[in-house]
Amino acid sequence: MEVAAAPLSLESQAGSVAEAPARDDGCAVAPAARPVLRERGQREVFCGLTGIIWLHRKIQDAFFIIVGSRTCAHLMQSAAGVMAFAEPRFATAIIEDRDLAGLADANDELDKVVDRLLARRPDVKAVFLVGSCPSEVIKLDLSRAAQRLSARHMPNVRVLAYSGSGIETTFTQGEDACLTALVRDMPVAPADAPPSLLVLGALPDVVEDQFKRTFDALGIGPVAFLPARRARDLPAVGPNTRLLLAQPFLADTVRALEDRGATRIDALFPFGAEGTSAWFEAAAAEFGIAPAHVETVLAPGRDRARRALEPARRQLEGKSIFFFPDSQLEPPLARFLSRELGMRPIEVGTPYLHGTHLARDLALLPAETRLSEGQDVERQLDRCRAAAPDLVVCGLGLANPLEAEGLTTKWAIELVFSPIHGFEQAADLAGLFARPLARRGLLKV
Ligand code: SF4
């Protein structure tokens, strides 16, 4: 087994094609009033390994070992190349042909890889073994390997495992799988513990700090974030834990926490002035905070965000937009773009539609917007060409061909890499959609 440190390449990248099975999670339905076009054809979307790119930045004492093939290493090299990092804390343990001789050898090799890593990097306090597609990796029981290695390296280092395989996961589902693995290690909160809030979804530190300040001002606490900056900072969870989702793609994490007795707060997602305001208001209502106080705390940020959105609104109002399925952020972003910037979402595609978690956002989408779940990429491309939208949001693999056809595109991956939540980031989020149109306008001159 050879370890390839994640290289920093600035190569351009094509999307990785992954076929993922339909989920049977009981919430892949939109509210009954809105029809959903469900497609189960070929997908053009990253696999869950790509989540490591933002997760390793967020969890600052964690190291991610992808147990995979050269294809996986190349994907990570290309995806990481979109952003430049000084010291990545991920690498690919490449399964070589000689590892196939016997699984016992592969386990021994994996143990040696982890031992060598920890001897070299004493700053690492959590190791994630991340599974991938190759059949020789699937045969390895990474959960058992994580247990074995944890027993060896605890209390200094915790070892966990999850799958980022393209057979099981698309793009942001890698984060869902990673957080679900962390939930298993969360301590049990006693039944009489005071109410606490757990915010779910990896957020840039600057956004997490802003949110913390607002929760403090509202009088909501204690508040914890999953994932936290340190892998060991796992809050206790129990019947008095309230969950507030910052990301819409965490169905398995929510289910694992609900199994531990936690309760989800129903809310809009915190994008734009309206979404952020409603998100905090929902949490405040759950914690019994007086509405007048909530208004006093939220009004300045909301007004600032509204004013900051004005220039983008002048640019984007009336423009049509078409979302290919990618990050699962598509429905709440379409809600933000239509309600706060006056855009017209023609089709909002998403890999999975978690209707229960998204109910409030879906209810605010224009009635004429088509919702689609899953993908049959050729058919969707035909619909997109026929609609001739002003802006297309899609994966990197589709962007260049569509640009060549004269369509203006936005890389969906940037929406995951950029700070876009909250009042202070509302204008930056709008700018991500306004810039490609401005660039296209300049090219036409
Ligand atoms: S996990 Fe699967 S889909 Fe992802 S890069 Fe590796 S082989 Fe490709």
Image (cartoon, rainbow, N blue to C red):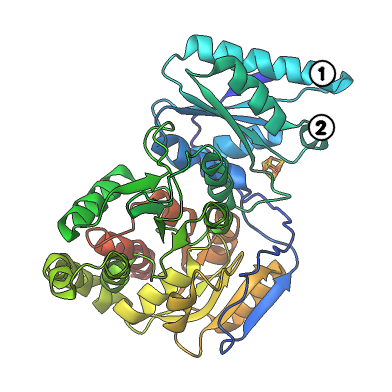
Mark 2, secondary structure of its residue: helix
Q: CA distance from mark 2 to mark 1?
A: 12 Å
The quadrant in which the C terminus is found is bottom left
Q: At x 42% / y 70%, what residue is drawn?
A: 266
* Amino acid type of the residue that numbered disc 2 sits on in the rendered structure: Glu
Question: Image height check: is 214 above or below 145?
Answer: below
Q: Position of residue 183 (x, y in %)?
A: 52, 43
- 2 lies above or below 86: above
Quarter, ligand 1? top right
Q: Indicate which disc residue 104 carries.
A: 1
Q: Is residue 154 above or below residue 205?
A: above
Residue 263 in view in this figure: yes
| View extreme (front): residue | 192
Q: CB of mark 2 within 8 Å of CB of mark 1?
A: no
Disc number for residue 301:
none
Report whether residue 6 is seen. Answer: no
Write down the quadrant of residue 92 in the picture: top right
Residue located beneath label 2 in the image = 136
Task: Report how many numbered discs are placed on residues in the image.
Answer: 2
